[in-house]
Image (spheres, helix red, strand yellow):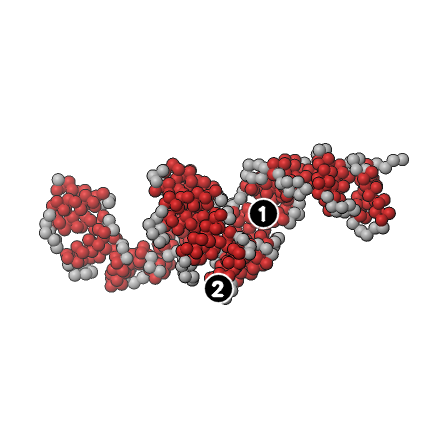
C-alpha cells in the first residue's frame, strides 16, 4: 500500500533533519535520494529543498536554486514559500533587491496567516519599500510578528513608540520594548532615552553612557559618535575633550560615518568647550553633505541663516536647507518655511511647515501650535494642543508650560485645572520659571484645586527668586494686601521697584500711583510722572492715561492739551476706560 502524502512529507522531514548530522556518504546519498524523488509531490517538500540549498544542508549552498524551489512552492500559494521568496527579494539574497516583488509575496504570505512574514511587511510599510508608506499598517504588522515570537519585532515596536509611528509617542513603552531585545539598535535608543531624560524627565547619564557604549561595541555607528558627546560633556564618564574629538575624527576617517562629520563640524562652530574654527567646521560639514548627511546640511543652513560671522545669507542657507530636506531632515523643512516667510510667500511657508510637522519636526510642531492655539477654528486649536502634547512627551519645558496653559484656559482641550497644575509642576522640574506664577495663580483662584493662599504665596515667592516677572508682581500684591502673609508695604514697594526695573509696566503704574496718591509714599508728582514714563515704554495703558492726565492738569509738566489728547488716545486704544471720557471732553 503506497504511503500517504503526509507520511511522505514526514519521511522527507526526518531525512532533512538527519542531513544536519554527520552521516556516512551512502547514508547521505540515500537521504538525498528520498527527498529529491518527492521534490514535486507536495509544496512542503519543494519548499524544504529550497531551504536545503539556502542553508547548504546536505547540498552545496546555492541561493539561486533555493529561490527557484521556493518560487515553485509559492506559485501554489504555500505561505511559508511565499515568505521565503519575499524575504530573499527583500534582502537581495540570490537575486537583486526588489522591494516591489518582496512586498507582493510578503503581503500574500501574511494574508494567508503566516505571521513570520509580518516583520518584513511591517518594515516595507514603515519605509515605503514596494508600497506606499503607512505607519499604522507598519505598527500593526510588527505587533503580529511580535505575537509570533519574532524577537526582531521588539525593536521596531519600540521604534514606533519612540517616533510616534502609527501610535502615540510613549517613551516608557518604547523603553520596555527595547529592553526585550537589547540588540545594537535597541541599546542605542535606550541610550538616547536616558541621555535626554525622556523616561522620567531627568537625564540618567550613567545609563546613557553604558547603553551607548554597548551599542557602539556591537557596531552601531551613531552610538559610537554619541559616546564622543558623553566625553565632550562629561555625561556618565570623566570629561575628556581630546577623547571626544578623537572619537569624532575616528568616525570620519575610519567609519566614514556622516554623523561624525556633523558632530565634528558642529563642535568647531558652536561648542563652548572647543576653540571655534569656522573653516574646519565648514569643511567637515560640506563633506558630510556629500556623504548624504541631512544633519550637516541643517547646520550649514543655520550658519548662513543666522549670520553667525556676517550678515545672514538666505540664498545660501536656502540651498542647504533644500539639500537637507531631500536627505529627509525634517528641521530643514521647518527652516525653509522661515525663509518663505521672509520672502513673503506665506502659502509656501505653510506647505513646508506642514511637511516638517508630518515628518516629526518638534520645531515645526511648536511653531504651528503657537500660531493657531488661539485661532477661531476649533479644529486648529485642537491640533495645536495635540502638537504641544506630543512635544511635551520629550519633557520640553516650553511645551509642558503650553499644555498646562491649554488645560487651564480650555484651549484646544476641555478645561481641567488639576491637569493644568500637574503640567505646571512638570514644567517647574524642567526649569521653567514662568510655571511658578501659574501654580500660584491656580492656588489663589481655583475652587477645583482648592484655594490656598499660603501655597500661592510660596509659589509666587519661589518664582520671584527665579526672576519671574509675573511672580514678582503677584508677590508684591500679596504683601500690599496682606494675602497669604502679613501686610508689608515696604516689602511690596521693594518688589514693585524690582519688577519695574525688569520691564513691568503694571509695576511702574502702581509705583506712579503710590506717589500720585500720597498714601503709602509721600506725594511726589515728579516721581510719579517718571514711573508713568517708564510704563509708557512698555505700552501700559494706565501709565499712558496718567501721562495724558498730567498734561491735562499740568502736574510736574507744562499743561498741553494736544499732548494730553495724544496720550488719552493711546490709552483708549490700549483699553483704558477713563481715556475715552477725557477724549470726548477735550473734543
**Residue matched to label 1:** 156
* Left or right: 409 in relation to 128: left
| Residue situated in front as seen by the camera: 162 or 96 | 96
Res 338 visible: no
The vertical placement of 249 against 448, above or below, is below
Q: Quadrant of the N terminus?
A: top right
Tell me what residue is drawn at x 16 percent, y 48 percent.
Answer: 548
* Left or right: 210 in relation to 50: left
Name which of mark 2 and mark 1 comes first in the sequence: 1
Q: Position of residue 7 (x, y in %)?
A: 83, 39
Dot 2: what SS?
Answer: helix
Tell me what residue is drawn at x 52 percent, y 60 percent.
Answer: 247
Q: Using the numbered discs, state the Cα–Cα distance from disc 2 to disc 1 in whole angstroms.
A: 36 Å
Dot 1: what SS?
Answer: helix
**Residue matched to label 2:** 242
Image-quadrant location for residue 42: top right
* Left or right: 466 in relation to 197: left
Q: Position of residue 331 (x, y in %)?
A: 44, 46
| Residue situated in front as seen by the camera: 348 or 169 | 348
Contact between marks 2 and 1 (CB within 8 A): the answer is no
All told, the count of numbered labels is 2
Disc assigned to residue 521? none
Q: Position of residue 149 (x, y in %)?
A: 66, 47
Tell me what residue is drawn at x 46 percent, y 53 percent.
Answer: 284
Amino acid at each position: 500500500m503506497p504511503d500517504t502524502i503526509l507520511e511522505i512529507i514526514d519521511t522527507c522531514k526526518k531525512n532533512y533533519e538527519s542531513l544536519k548530522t554527520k552521516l556516512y556518504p551512502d547514508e547521505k546519498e540515500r537521504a538525498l535520494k528520498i527527498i529529491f524523488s518527492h521534490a514535486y509531490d507536495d509544496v512542503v517538500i519543494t519548499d524544504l529543498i529550497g531551504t536545503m540549498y539556502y542553508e547548504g544542508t546536505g547540498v552545496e549552498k546555492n541561493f539561486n536554486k533555493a529561490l527557484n524551489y521556493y518560487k515553485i512552492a509559492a506559485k501554489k500559494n504555500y505561505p511559508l514559500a511565499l515568505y521565503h521568496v519575499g524575504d530573499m527579494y527583500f534582502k537581495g539574497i540570490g537575486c537583486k533587491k526588489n522591494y516591489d516583488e518582496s512586498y507582493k509575496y510578503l503581503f500574500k504570505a501574511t494574508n494567508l496567516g503566516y505571521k513570520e512574514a509580518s516583520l518584513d511587511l511591517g518594515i516595507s510599510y514603515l519605509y515605503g519599500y514596494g508600497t506606499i508608506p503607512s505607519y499604522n499598517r507598519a505598527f500593526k504588522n510588527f505587533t503580529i510578528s511580535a505575537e509570533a515570537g519574532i524577537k526582531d519585532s521588539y525593536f521596531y515596536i519600540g521604534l514606533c513608540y519612540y517616533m510616534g509611528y502609527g501610535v502615540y509617542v510613549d517613551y516608557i513603552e518604547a523603553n520596555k520594548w527595547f529592553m526585550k531585545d537589547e540588540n545594537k539598535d535597541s541599546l542605542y535608543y535606550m541610550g538616547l532615552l536616558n541621555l535626554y531624560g525622556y523616561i522620567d524627565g531627568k537625564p540618567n547619564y550613567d545609563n546613557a553612557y553604558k547603553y551607548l557604549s554597548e551599542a557602539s561595541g556591537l557596531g552601531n555607528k551613531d552610538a559610537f559618535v554619541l559616546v564622543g558627546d558623553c566625553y565632550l560633556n562629561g555625561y556618565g564618564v570623566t570629561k575628556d575633550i581630546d577623547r571626544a574629538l578623537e572619537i569624532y575624527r575616528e568616525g570620519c576617517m575610519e567609519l566614514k560615518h556622516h554623523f561624525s562629520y556633523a558632530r565634528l563640524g558642529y563642535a568647531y562652530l558652536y561648542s563652548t568647550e572647543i576653540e571655534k574654527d569656522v573653516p574646519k567646521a565648514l569643511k567637515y560639514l560640506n563633506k558630510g553633505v556629500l556623504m548624504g548627511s541631512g544633519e550637516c546640511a541643517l547646520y550649514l543652513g543655520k550658519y548662513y541663516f543666522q549670520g553667525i560671522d556676517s550678515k545672514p545669507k538666505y540664498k545660501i542657507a536656502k540651498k542647504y536647507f533644500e539639500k537637507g530636506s531631500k536627505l529627509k531632515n525634517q528641521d530643514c523643512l521647518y527652516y525653509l518655511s522661515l525663509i518663505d516667510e521672509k520672502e513673503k510667500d506665506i502659502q509656501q511657508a505653510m506647505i513646508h511647515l506642514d511637511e516638517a510637522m508630518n515628518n516629526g519636526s518638534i520645531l515645526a510642531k511648536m511653531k504651528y501650535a503657537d500660531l493657531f492655539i488661539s485661532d477661531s477654528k476649533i479644529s486648529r486649536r485642537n491640533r495645536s494642543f495635540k502638537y504641544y502634547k506630543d512635544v511635551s512627551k520629550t519633557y520640553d519645558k516650553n511645551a509642558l508650560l503650553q499644555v498646562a496653559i491649554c488645560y487651564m484656559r480650555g484651549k484646544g482641550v476641555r478645561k481641567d485645572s488639576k491637569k493644568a497644575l500637574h503640567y505646571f509642576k512638570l514644567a517647574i522640574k524642567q526649569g521653567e520659571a514662568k510655571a511658578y506664577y501659574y501654580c500660584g495663580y491656580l492656588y489663589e483662584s481655583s475652587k477645583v484645586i482648592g484655594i490656598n493662599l499660603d501655597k500661592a504665596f510660596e509659589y509666587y515667592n519661589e518664582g520671584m527668586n527665579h526672576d519671574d516677572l509675573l511672580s514678582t508682581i503677584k508677590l508684591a500684591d500679596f504683601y500690599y494686601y496682606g494675602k497669604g502673609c502679613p501686610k508689608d508695604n515696604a516689602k511690596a514697594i521693594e518688589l514693585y521697584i524690582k519688577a519695574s526695573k525688569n520691564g513691568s509696566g503694571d509695576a511702574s503704574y502702581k509705583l506712579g500711583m503710590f506717589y500720585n496718591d500720597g498714601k503709602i509714599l509721600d506725594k511726589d508728582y515728579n516721581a510719579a510722572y517718571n514711573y508713568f514714563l517708564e510704563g509708557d515704554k512698555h505700552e501700559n495703558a494706565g501709565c499712558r492715561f496718567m501721562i495724558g492726565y498730567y498734561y491735562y492738569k499740568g502736574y510736574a509738566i507744562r499743561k498741553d492739551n494736544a499732548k494730553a489728547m495724544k496720550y488719552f488716545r493711546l490709552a483708549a486704544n490700549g483699553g483704558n476706560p477713563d481715556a475715552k471720557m477725557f477724549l470726548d471732553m477735550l473734543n
